[in-house]
């Protein structure tokens, strides 16, 4: 205890001596809220006694505050390690507290470049041997200047804003500090980076203004923008020059009506025309707008003051309804929307004849009616691609129309089915049967311009056990030559109504052809031999997808060689795929064929016969399902507004089994009777190949069965006519199939015996060696496969009754025959 007491006494005496020697330092701290991130690379330091003034901070100064006890006028030394290998010492004194301490030389340092530096500052009072130290981490570099901009157009400088240039890329320029920086806005924002600190003025690139025929009329925001001080918001008001490129929105409006008394005025018993398409051509663009229930329309388009626009009636719509008009086109001068004056008015009096102004637009929804109330309630599943027949007289299909529902179960059609104000609708019976559905109605009456409900019992109490409908096709893309790259489009999807869950999809390509894996955009694939396999899952009740895959075709192949690409899609989960006739696709490519952008090809539920893939020949006695793909391309120099494909079905086809598989664009199928089908792509606006080659293509695929009684050597041909707008028809090639007896289908031969045939619950194979086998249904889908020993009994309990193709491979030999399950 005595020893510790003695030490305490000495410590007290030492501190007392220090106090007598002046200001005792206890701390050195950077002033609170001082920014440690700076635009510049030059730093100044300042030192304050006890406290600092409120204005001690600046963009370039770090203010340090000395604290201590027993303040008296004192002299200090400051040592600074700048963190980049440089050090400096500074000397200075102070006579009173709360003031800056003058030091020599001025504490300033310039860093070699942007970066993060640790600055260590130490203060010494040698009179009493006290020290204080502080450390600060500084991030130094060039400045940023974020700019939020708004560009509004007052075209005629009347003080009324006509439009805003939302999300239009605009090149900006800032000038200051002896430098000029440029940048282009994206979503009305641009961040200038890597600039020197200072004040800048903001402007729009004059070349962009000139190209778009704008002048800057007004600028709202700070006159000078400070770099490094945060985001700046500015507003430019632009005026239009003389003529201009795209100065802003222009408007035109009008009305369409049946002019009953032919006086050119809407009055008396005149009837407004609803859903009528009006075409507006302006500069390099074109658009279509539709009239409302009162026959009125308003079109807003990008144009220039004093420019011209052409307003016209859609000729296809006029012809379809049997209408005529004294005036079908008018030219107007562009006028900005909201310019303080009424926009130009272009109205069209129409001679409607016996149609009496009936717009003949019919629409509705097809859905699984789970509660049987006849109304599409929330959660009830839409039926996608369901064929709906519309007719004025269901007993007379000559003037009937078949339309297909979209992914929401909705269908619509505008056309002159009759001179009455209603049509009768029903759902195709083959579609319902193949899906296991029943309709909750016989016929539904749809009034013009009304939306009807077509409820369907999908099973499980009206929707609980509804099924999915997976489909796939393969379609050509460009020509097919040896020693070149071939483009093949694989298409697939689910028509619903249930989500498909997990499924497997394959694409098999010809032997010797190699796939470019980098062109496969659909992930999750494996390749074994010449088959690409995807294990996928999709929870959507209706969707479609495609993948354009490239293949390398080797050289040395004889011209005319047939190469087949085939696809399959197979459910893996517990869901039911209720329509399996569309689960396989195939494409024949003939080596050396040039690319015809408007052509037609046919593939059936083909099968291999003694290693030879059949094409034109089909087996007599088997009801083949034929798949027709028609593709078209706009090779002109302007968009195609409407495309109609006229396809006349062969009498050897069962027209009632027609089923649309897929289409690249929304399509209306019109049945004119006698096997004549119209595939109408109204308002497709297909780009021309010189403007957008990838989007200039279109195609569709449908399936149809041949007649069950087609005899030996009966032939099936098919030709399509493609109409682009009002141009002459483009005639496709003619497809050809013939019923014949295919070699190898009659017997398996002496090497393999099959019994019984017809079979019920099983069949047996008696071979001389181990074998592999597979059963293929008439849609081309493999339903059973495996391997066996010389004597094998194979169960058929899981298969439906019908005709199958049995293929057996023993060593290098392949045998094929028909198997009937009863």
Image (cartoon, rainbow, N blue to C red):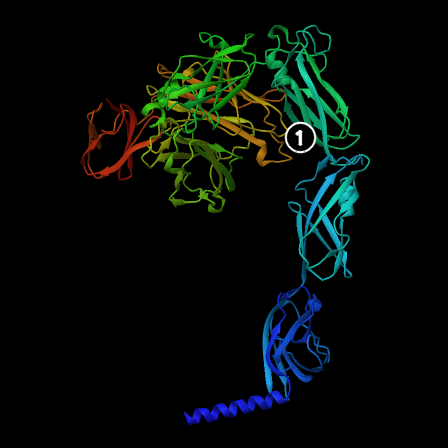
Q: Considering only vertical position in the picture, is 99 above or below 159?
A: below
The residue identified by callout 1 is 637
Give the left or right position of residue 302, taking residue 792 as reference. Answer: right
Give the left or right position of residue 370, taking residue 207 as reference. Answer: left
Residue at the extreme left of the image, as rendered: 791
Give the camera-side residue of 797 and 732: 797
The image quarter in which residue 448 lies:
top right
Give the camera-side residue of 514 and 475: 475
Is residue 6 visible in the rendered image? The answer is yes
Q: Residue at x 23, y 22 (%)?
A: 822
Q: Secondary structure at mark 1?
A: loop
Give the camera-side residue of 360 and 760: 360
The percent coordinates of residue 491 (x first, y second) are 46, 34
The N terminus: image quadrant: bottom left
The image quarter in which residue 214 lies:
top right
Q: Considering only vertical position in the picture, is 626 above or below 477?
A: above
Q: Residue at x 44, y 33 (%)?
A: 492
How packed is label 1: few (under 14 Cα within 10 Å), some, or many (20 or more)?
Answer: few
The percent coordinates of residue 818 (x first, y second) are 28, 25
Give the left or right position of residue 340, taking residue 63 as reference. Answer: right
The percent coordinates of residue 150 (x first, y second) are 70, 44
Count the labels in the image.
1
Is residue 773 visible in the rendered image? The answer is no
The percent coordinates of residue 265 (x first, y second) are 72, 11
Give the camera-side residue of 500 and 177: 177
Q: Residue at x 62, y 36 (%)?
A: 692
The image quarter in which residue 309 lies:
top right
Q: Considering only vertical position in the picture, is 64 above or below 658?
A: below
Q: Residue at x 49, y 20 (%)?
A: 364
């Amino acid at each position: 205890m005595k020893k510790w007491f003695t030490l305490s006494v000495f410590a007290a005496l030492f501190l007392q001596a220090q106090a007598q020697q002046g200001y005792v330092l206890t701390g050195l701290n950077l002033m609170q809220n001082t920014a440690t991130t700076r635009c510049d690379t030059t730093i100044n330091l300042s030192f304050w006694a006890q406290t600092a003034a409120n204005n001690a901070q600046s963009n370039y100064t770090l203010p340090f505050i000395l604290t201590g006890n027993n303040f008296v006028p004192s002299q200090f030394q400051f040592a600074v390690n700048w963190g980049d290998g440089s050090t400096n010492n500074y000397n200075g004194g102070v006579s009173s507290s709360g003031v800056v301490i003058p030091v020599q030389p001025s504490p300033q340092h310039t860093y070699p470049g942007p970066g993060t530096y640790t600055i260590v500052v130490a203060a010494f009072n040698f009179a009493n041997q006290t020290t204080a130290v502080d450390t600060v981490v500084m991030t130094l570099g060039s400045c940023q200047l974020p700019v939020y901009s708004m560009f509004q157009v007052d075209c005629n400088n009347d003080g009324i804003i006509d439009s805003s240039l939302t999300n239009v890329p605009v090149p900006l320029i800032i000038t200051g500090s002896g430098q000029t920086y440029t940048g282009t806005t994206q979503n009305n924002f641009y961040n200038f980076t890597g600039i020197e600190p200072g004040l800048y003025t903001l402007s729009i690139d004059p070349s962009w203004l000139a190209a778009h025929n704008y002048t800057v009329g007004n600028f709202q925001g700070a006159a000078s923008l400070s770099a490094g001080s945060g985001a700046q918001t500015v507003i430019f008001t632009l005026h239009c020059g003389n003529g201009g490129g795209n100065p802003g929105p222009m408007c035109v409006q009008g009305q369409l009506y049946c002019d009953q008394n032919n006086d050119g005025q809407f009055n008396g018993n005149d009837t407004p025309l609803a859903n009528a398409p009006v075409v507006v051509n302006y500069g390099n663009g074109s658009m279509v707008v539709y009239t409302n229930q009162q026959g009125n329309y308003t079109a807003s388009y990008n144009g220039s003051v004093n420019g011209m626009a052409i307003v016209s009636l859609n000729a296809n719509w006029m012809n379809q309804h049997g209408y005529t008009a004294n005036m079908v086109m008018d030219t107007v001068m562009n006028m900005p929307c909201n310019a303080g004056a009424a926009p130009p008015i272009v109205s069209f009096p129409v001679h409607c004849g016996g149609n009496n102004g009936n717009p003949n637009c019919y629409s509705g929804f097809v859905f699984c009616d789970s509660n049987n109330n006849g109304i599409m309630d929330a959660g009830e599943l839409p039926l996608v691609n369901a064929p709906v027949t519309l007719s004025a007289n269901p007993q007379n299909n000559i003037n009937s129309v078949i339309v297909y529902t979209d992914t929401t179960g909705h269908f619509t059609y505008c056309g002159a089915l009759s001179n009455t104000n209603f049509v009768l609708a029903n759902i195709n019976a083959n579609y319902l049967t193949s899906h296991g559905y029943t309709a909750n109605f016989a016929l539904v009456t749809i009034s013009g311009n009304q939306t009807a409900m077509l409820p369907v019992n999908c099973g499980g109490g009206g929707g609980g056990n509804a099924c999915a409908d997976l489909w796939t096709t393969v379609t050509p893309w460009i020509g097919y030559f040896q020693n070149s790259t071939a483009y093949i489009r694989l298409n697939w999807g689910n028509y619903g109504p249930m989500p498909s869950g997990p499924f497997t999809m394959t694409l098999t390509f010809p032997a010797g052809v190699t796939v470019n894996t980098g062109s496969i955009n659909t992930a999750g694939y494996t390749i074994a031999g010449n088959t690409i396999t995807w294990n996928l899952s999709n929870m959507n009740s209706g969707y479609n997808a495609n993948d354009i895959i490239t293949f390398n075709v080797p050289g040395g192949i004889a011209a005319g060689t047939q190469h087949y690409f085939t696809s399959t899609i197979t459910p893996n989960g517990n869901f039911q795929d209720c329509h399996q006739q569309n689960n396989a696709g195939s494409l024949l490519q003939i080596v050396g064929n040039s690319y015809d952008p408007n052509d037609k090809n046919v593939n059936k539920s083909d099968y291999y016969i003694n290693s030879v893939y059949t094409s034109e020949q089909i087996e007599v006695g088997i009801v083949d399902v034929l798949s027709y793909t028609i593709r078209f391309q706009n090779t002109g120099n302007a968009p195609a507004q409407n495309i109609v494909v006229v396809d006349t079905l062969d009498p050897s086809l069962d027209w009632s089994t027609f089923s649309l598989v897929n289409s690249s664009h929304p399509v209306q199928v019109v049945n004119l009777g006698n096997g004549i089908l119209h595939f109408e792509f109204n308002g497709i606006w297909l780009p021309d190949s010189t403007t957008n080659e990838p989007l200039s293509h279109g195609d569709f695929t449908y399936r149809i069965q041949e007649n069950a009684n087609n005899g030996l050597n009966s032939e099936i041909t098919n030709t399509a006519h493609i109409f682009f707008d009002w141009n002459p028809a483009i005639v496709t090639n003619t497809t050809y199939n013939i019923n014949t007896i295919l070699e190898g289908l009659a017997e398996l031969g002496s090497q393999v015996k099959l019994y019984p045939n017809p079979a019920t619950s099983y069949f047996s194979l008696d071979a001389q060696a181990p074998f592999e086998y597979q059963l293929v249904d008439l849609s081309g889908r493999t339903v059973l496969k495996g391997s066996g020993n010389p004597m094998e009994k194979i169960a058929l309990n899981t298969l439906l009754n019908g005709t199958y193709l049995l293929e057996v491979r023993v060593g290098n030999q392949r045998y094929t025959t028909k198997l009937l399950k009863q």
